[in-house]
Image (cartoon, helix red, strand yellow):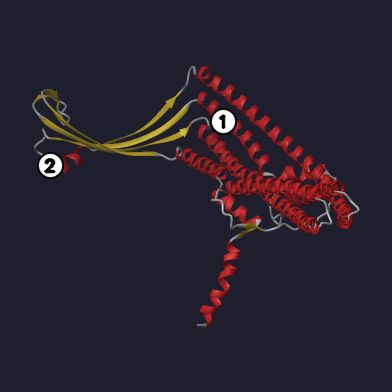
Amino acid sequence: MKHLLLLFCLLPLFSKAQNTLSLAECVDLLVKNNLTYQQSNLQAEASQAQLKQTRSQIFPQIYIGADQSLNIGRSIDQYTNAYIDEVYSYNAIGTGLRIPVFQGFKLQNQIRQGVLLKESFAENKTAVLNAQTVLLMQGYVNVLATKSLLEAADQQVASSQQQVDRVEKQVNAGVAASNLLFEIRAQLANDRFDQVTALNNYRTARLALFQRINIAPDDKVEFESLAPKDTTQHADNVAAIYEDAQKTFPELRSAELYRQSFVYLVKSIKAENYPSLFMGANIRAFYASTNTNLDYFKQLNATRNGSLSLSLNIPIMGRWVTRPRIDLAKVQERQAQNTLDVTNQQLRQAIELAVLNLNAMADKYAAAQGQVESLTASFSVVESKLNAGVANIFEYSLAKANLAKAQANAIQAKYGFLMQQRLLQYYRQGNWEGVF
């Protein structure tokens, strides 16, 4: 009974825990549910399967065959090689193998190309996950920011409502004019409009985040807040961060491996211009119904035969066929090199922007905090004057609007700073360890 009561007491805690998602848990859901990442997984699996298929061509091709025929009219007796004119049946069985001895190292180069493509798609899978994680982190921070903006809008509405209640009492007591009440109600209406806008922005941000992790939206789910990172607030050494990122970022490794694969593609195509040599072997036996002296198995034993063969194929005008394919492969290699250059450029520019944004957000956040402190004090003074009847509604509305704007700036700067801290930490490390 005691354990049952304890379970009932803990159920609300379990329910609360299940209805709260952290950034790390959202990333886990992203890995599980995001279709863009799943597509990159399938590409990696396909490249692995393609490599296995290419490697299988090195092995001997072993076969077993069987023939069954019914001969009618004039034909050759398979057992005596004499002409006969009768109906008889013929059955043959055999096995053999064919081994590629030399193909100008075509298969070896195709295998090397396949290995590079497999590694490239594996790196690309990680790169896709990283890109999706950055978008997820932006969406997560946007949810927290819009929620804080909504809470600030709620406070503005509550403040205006208090003023409306106070002025209504003064109007009813005959100590304030009714026009003041209308002006205060107008301020409340403006604040409620801003509240509705903030609510819609919050709902939109939540929906976008749920869609990013590909789960059904749930109004009961809350998202954990983010704490500032214990890192230097300003970052200046872009070159050092970029140099380290070049060694670790999967986007660059994937593009470089993809470019290298075309080198072996060209070699494998050129190999078709070289002579190719195959070795074969087979053994066969047959049974013909025209031979009535031997039964089936004795006749198979009597007719067994085999052979070994070497097959040489020398292309005469192969270059006419392979030259256009080689030219195309070389163009694709240059395209892959250009993709690598673009990826390098994008990474460098992303790091430059992240450093700039972190510095800017750190300064902006500090300035916004000071602005909120000053305007909060200023608004308190104006509100006190309004309550004392020595300030007009215009002064109150202006002070209130300035404070609301300062609070919004501080909220946006705060979450922008938290986002940039994590993003730059990711660029420094090349992975997400400790970022969440």
Three-letter amino acid code at the position of disc 2? Asp
Label pair 1/2, CB-CB below 8 angstroms: no
- Of 189 and 364, the residue lying toward us: 189
Mark earlier in primary sequence (1, 2):
1
Is residue 138 toward the left or the right of residue 181 in the image?
Answer: left
As drawn, 347 above or below 369: above
The residue singled out by tag 1 in the image is 265
Q: Is residue 272 left or right of residue 244?
A: left
**Amino acid marked by disc 1:** Leu
In the image, residue 77 lies at what x, y percent? 14, 28
- Residue 96 image point, x, y percent: 33, 38
Left or right: 277, with 197 as reference point: left
Tag nearer the camera, 1 or 2? 1
Instruction: State how many labels appear.
Output: 2
| Residue assigned mark 2 | 295
**Near-viewer residue (146 or 299):** 146
Q: Is residue 3 visible?
A: yes
